[in-house]
Image (cartoon, grey):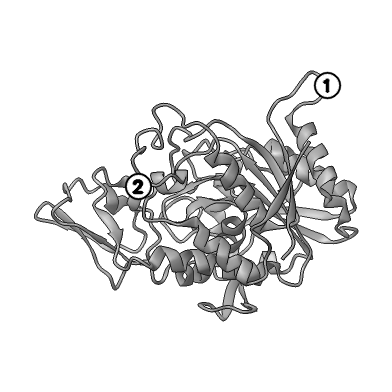
């Protein structure tokens, strides 16, 4: 497969061009106008951030994309699907409340918000996965599948189960209905090492399935209830929680790529990633830790696979932020994301996406 083009600009500005204007220029040069958007419904897939988290992308960036889509004749809307875990985005009403609280509204972004899988996360479309090895038919939120064009607006950051979250995860996991998310996490059941457990009970509050209990000062996970969503992992102060099967995170990465293939195959798409506020864990958390590296910049590409690889390479070339989780894990693998979450390997998802024909892991970086 030939190399893809990934376009990049840093976060430096001057009096003549602010960051929204610079993002607009990046999108134009990267070729977003090559999409036929005239009178098309355009789903801008984004993460609205969990309540209490302050690392998610600001609505100002979404407005830049929305305004450009409207200028090109499209009918844009912002979208995400409901979550599997306990939080404030598990149904459409709470999800919208959280989006509004975090600054996303028709007034701040210039378009409406549609929760893709409906009120209770059950409004889904069965979509075949071309070449799928683990998933033959994905369960995708109807709001995403009803769109004519998909644009992913991604916040690049670490993730405790997949290594990092970028375009593939935003599209794959983020477009899956609640049942789809269960399917992606199905093999990722977790366990608690009783010898390490302190009995602090912090993990109990994160479980939406009531799979965790604490008796005699030790917590345990019921494998029949656990869905492997991983929300409990970063809450444990002694890292006593790990997957039952060592391959579970690998298959999660593969399934995310297969869900992304279900969404993107056969439809126009474009991808934008901001590698800023690069926290160790997902924006699904109700908190955000110190960024592991300084802000890198803004990236855009027609190829979501190359985009993810380019962002990972750029992050791995940065110095560690003093006092961050990365700074305190220098003895682990040289890849920053494995230093933060040693049980992960993001390359597996990338390799699977290449096999599925989603894009190329080889790229030319065009700096503007």
Q: Quadrant of residue 156?
A: top right
Residue 143 is situated, as x and y percent measured from the top left of the image, at 68, 65
**Residue position marked by numbered label 1 in the rendering:** 16
* Residue 28 percent across, percent down from the top left: 84, 44
Q: CA distance from mark 1 to mark 2?
A: 42 Å
Tell me where residue 120 appears, x and y as whole percent: 53, 65
Q: Residue at x 45, y 57 (%)?
A: 345
Could you classify mark 1 by the number of other residues whose Cα lies within 10 Å: few (under 14), some (14-19), or many (20 or more)? few
Looking at the rendered structure, the secondary structure element under dot 2 is: helix
Relative placement, left or right, of 81 versus 224 is: right
Evaluate if marks 1 and 2 touch, with contact meaning CB atoms under 8 Å apart.
no
* Residue 192 quadrant: bottom left
* Nearest the eye: 144 or 295: 295
Give me the residue at 67% from left, 56% from top: 362
Residue at image location 61% in from the left, 45% down from the top: 311
Instruction: Give percent across and percent down for residue 202.
Output: 27, 47
The residue that disc 2 covers is 234
Q: Judge from the rendering whether residue 324 lies leftward or rightward of residue 138; answer left or right.
A: left
Q: Nearer the viewer, residue 41 or 259?
A: 259
Task: Classify mark 2: residues with Cα within 10 Å, few (<14), some (14-19) or many (20+).
Answer: some
């Amino acid at each position: 497969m030939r190399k893809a083009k990934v376009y990049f600009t840093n976060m430096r500005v001057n009096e003549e061009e602010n960051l929204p204007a610079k993002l607009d220029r990046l999108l134009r040069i990267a070729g977003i106008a090559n999409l036929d958007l005239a009178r098309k419904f355009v789903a801008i897939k984004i993460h609205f951030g969990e309540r209490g988290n302050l690392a998610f992308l600001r609505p100002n960036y979404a407005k830049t994309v929305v305004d450009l889509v409207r200028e090109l004749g499209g009918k844009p809307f912002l979208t995400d699907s409901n979550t599997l875990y306990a939080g404030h985005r598990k149904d459409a009403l709470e999800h919208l409340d959280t989006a509004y609280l975090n600054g996303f509204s028709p007034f701040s972004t210039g378009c409406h918000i549609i929760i893709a899988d409906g009120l209770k996360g059950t409004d889904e479309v069965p979509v075949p996965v071309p070449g799928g090895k683990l998933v033959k038919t994905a369960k995708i939120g109807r709001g995403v599948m009803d769109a004519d064009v998909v644009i992913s607006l991604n916040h690049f950051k670490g993730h405790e189960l997949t290594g990092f979250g970028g375009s593939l995860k935003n599209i794959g996991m983020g477009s899956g209905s609640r049942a789809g998310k269960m399917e992606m996490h199905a093999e990722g059941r977790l366990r608690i090492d009783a010898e390490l457990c302190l009995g602090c009970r912090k993990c109990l509050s994160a479980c939406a399935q009531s799979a965790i209990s604490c008796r005699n000062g030790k917590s345990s996970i019921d494998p029949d209830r656990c869905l492997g969503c991983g929300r409990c992992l970063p809450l444990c102060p002694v890292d006593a929680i790990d997957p039952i099967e060592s391959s579970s995170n690998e298959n999660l990465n593969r399934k995310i790529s297969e869900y992304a293939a279900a969404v993107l195959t056969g439809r126009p798409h474009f991808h934008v990633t901001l590698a800023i506020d690069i926290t160790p864990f997902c924006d699904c958390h109700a908190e955000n830790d110190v960024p592991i590296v300084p802000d890198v910049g803004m990236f855009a590409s027609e190829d979501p696979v190359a985009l993810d690889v380019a962002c990972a390479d750029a992050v791995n070339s940065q110095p560690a932020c003093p006092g961050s989780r990365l700074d305190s894990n220098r003895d682990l693998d040289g890849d920053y994301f494995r230093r933060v979450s040693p049980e992960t390997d993001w390359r597996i998802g990338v390799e699977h996406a290449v096999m599925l024909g989603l894009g190329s892991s080889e790229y030319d970086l065009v700096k503007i």
